[in-house]
Image (spheres, rainbow, N blue to C red):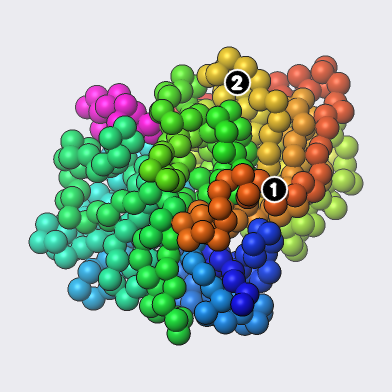
Amino acid sequence: MREFILTIDEGTTSARAIVFNHEGDCVSVAAKEFTQYYPASGWLEHDPNEIWTTTIEVIKKAMQNGNIADNEIKAIGITNQRETTVVWDKCTGKPVYNAIVWGDRRTAEFCDGLRNKGYEPIIKQKTGLVLDPYFSGTKVRWILDHVEGAREKAENGDLLFSNIDGWIIWNLTGGKAHVTDYSNASRTLMFNINDLKWDNELLSMLDVPANMLPEVKQSSGYFATATKIFKNQIPITGVAGDQMAATFGQCCFEKGMSKFTYGTAGVMTMNIGDKPIASKNGLLTTIGWGLNGKVVYLMEGIVYNAGSAIQWLRDELKFIEASPDSEFFAKKVGDDNEVYVVPAFTGFAAPYWDAYARGTIVGLSRGTSKNNIIRATLESLSYQTKDLVDALAEDFGQRLPLLKVDGGACRNDLMTQFTSDILDMDVERPSNVETTAAGAAYLAGLAVGYWKNEEEIVQYRKIDKVFHPSMDEETRKKLYKGWKRAVNAALAWSKDR
């Protein structure tokens, strides 16, 4: 009998269902975008019910497309946009407010207040994170403070919180399981990554009742049984936040291995082993995954807008009809163009951490065309990659030997080659750039014996192309200096508000 692993991949702009075979190949995939809501400047929300109905739709379509029966699915893996916060009524199953998305900045002033009270060092020591609106904890607090009756319900034990993974598991199990994994818990500002527990001091600081929080499990193992959608009962045995899943999917199993994912955001992670290490350069320390009773930690840098900058060219500026068109138009101009696009639409994350910065275009002249702006937007992804690679190298005192890349934007050869050039480093792209979904499948499959161990998974990994740097040092330095000036322009704009 045929056997497969199903991954539910809950992204920031779409839900996807992907079926994997034993060789780690996608045998069927279905995807559907859901609505992005922008109620105010710097705010971003999703409708949790729409995410759930979209998820049902893509699961059914993926199974149908691949002619796959329920009893051929051995296990389910789930990976998700992290930090996006859902609070729902456990009696009715209804969200009390829209999901507040990771890129939402509404709690910036609240974070400033906590910082002024001196909380940041204890947060960094316990969570590995910085005090920023990015993470779930301040979003939960905002919902409790701004939705009528929410705080009273929470204190009575009637409200539940989770990132998107827990919301999906709750619905897949008909409300029987309220669980998450170490990697998602480590993105909340409420979980102590040293002792692997929800932290009462942090909960008190945020004024979030402990009874709202999900049970936390290792990333590979039994979570719950899916009883909804499917005719058969299917175990959910792998859960990880998207960047952790992508790191696992890129087979970064050894300490020192790193990858960069070009999704809606751009995220670089490095496996730092079984002990958390603090960054001196604005990077985060986070939990990668829990597997076989052991925890792997990652050093992480994030830029909030990578693939979303290309979507901006498509959806708001109408410069392109589809994201892949960006490469065609960017090739119409040379790389000597002095236009820089800094896509800080929702502020800066690592290494600058400025919640109030916004997108900037500098170097415009009368001859600047849409093609220059398209090319500069693509190049911004590479410059932001270099910002993080340099910060990581400074933290560890050595350069990376190689950067593995994945995510939709890395299919763009022009951008990926420019990344290799600006880094002066080989960049490796796998044949399957769906590494986030693959990572969740691997975690789920390991738990049920579908794959024996990590070594077996490595054997199936296939490389599409390795990009080698071809830019001279003088050009590289000149271009990157221009980028830093453009970043400084964006930072200057955010001051003296």
Residue 71 in view, yes or no: yes
**Quarter of the rendering containing residue 29:** bottom right
Q: Quadrant of the C terminus?
A: top left
| 120 falls in the magenta region | yes
Q: Earlier in the sequence, mark 2 or mark 1?
A: 2
| 166 falls in the magenta region | no
Q: Is residue 213 above or below residue 128?
A: below
Residue at image coords 57%, 23%? 391
| Closer to the camera in the image, 74 or 414 | 74
- Dot 1 falls on a residue whose secondary structure is helix
Numbered circle sitting on residue 459: 1
Numbered circle sitting on residue 343: none
| Closer to the camera in the image, 399 or 4 | 4
Point out residue 264 in the picture as x, y percentages from the top left corner: 58, 51
Point out residue 271 in the picture as x, y percentages from the top left corner: 53, 33
Point out residue 70 in the picture as x, y percentages from the top left corner: 52, 80
- Dot 2 falls on a residue whose secondary structure is helix
- Which residues, given as a range, are shown in magenta? 112-130
State the predominant SS element of the stretch in magenta: helix
List the residue tagged with mark 2.
Answer: 393
Residue 116 in view, yes or no: no
Residue at image coords 82%, 18%? 473
- Crowding near the residue tagged with mark 2, few <14, some 14–19, many ≥20 C-alpha atoms within 10 Å: few
The amino acid on which the numbered mark 2 sits, given as a three-letter code, is Ala
Residue at image coords 29%, 62%? 178
**Quarter of the rendering containing residue 46:** bottom left
Q: Is residue 281 above or below residue 141?
A: above
Q: Is residue 352 above or below residue 26?
A: above
Residue at image coords 41%, 77%? 233
Cα distance in 3D space between marks 2 and 1:
29 Å
Of the two numbered discs 2 and 1 in the rendering, the one whose residue sits closer to the viewer = 1
